[in-house]
Image (tube, rainbow, N blue to C red):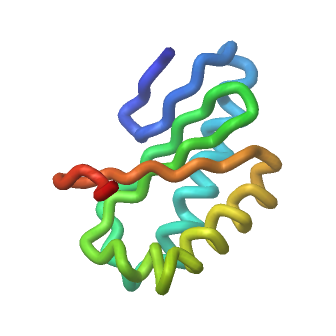
């Protein structure tokens, strides 16, 4: 699996990687614009088969998650419609997720 300094990972041939990189850059820009009040420091995008894993590093995760997780579900549906891929989110930060 190749890793780039832009935070995108994909295990695909070079011809397809260019198109995916453009899609990642556009998605990252749209997310930063939409969530600018959340204090986003970086966004990592990882691709595997027909799945997309998005990690958003933010100072204010409550803004992204929303009340009872409603905002994160809307965000997942929106990104899934744009990319036509199943979207998964992963908890990223200094503390592990609570169970």
Task: Describe residue 73's horizontal placement relative to residue 54 as left or right.
Answer: right
Rendered-image quadrant of the C terminus: bottom left
Comparing 21 with 81, the one in front is 81
Residue 6 lies, with reference to residue 38, above or below; the image says above
| Residue 17 x, y percent position in the rendering | 66, 26
Task: Describe residue 63's horizontal placement relative to residue 73 as left or right.
Answer: left
Please identify the quarter of the rendering in which residue 75 is found. bottom right
Residue at screen point 41% across, 82% down = 63
Residue 30 lies, with reference to residue 55, above or below; the image says below
Residue at screen point 19% across, 54% down = 95
Residue 31 lies, with reference to residue 6, above or below; the image says below
| Residue 13 x, y percent position in the rendering | 68, 13
* Number of disc labels: 0
Residue at screen point 31% across, 66% down = 58
| Residue 56 x, y percent position in the rendering | 41, 58
Please identify the quarter of the rendering in which residue 59 is found. bottom left
Task: Describe residue 12's horizontal placement relative to residue 54 as left or right.
Answer: right
Residue at screen point 45% across, 75% down = 64
């Amino acid at each position: 699996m190749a890793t780039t300094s832009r935070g995108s990972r994909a295990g695909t041939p070079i011809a397809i990687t260019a198109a995916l990189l453009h899609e990642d850059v556009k998605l990252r820009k749209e997310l930063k614009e939409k969530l600018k009040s959340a204090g986003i420091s970086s966004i990592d995008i990882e691709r595997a088969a027909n799945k997309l894993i998005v990690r958003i590093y933010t100072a204010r995760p409550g803004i992204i998650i929303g009340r009872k997780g409603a905002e994160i579900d809307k965000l997942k549906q929106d990104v899934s419609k744009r990319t036509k891929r199943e979207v998964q989110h992963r908890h990223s930060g200094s503390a592990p997720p609570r169970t």
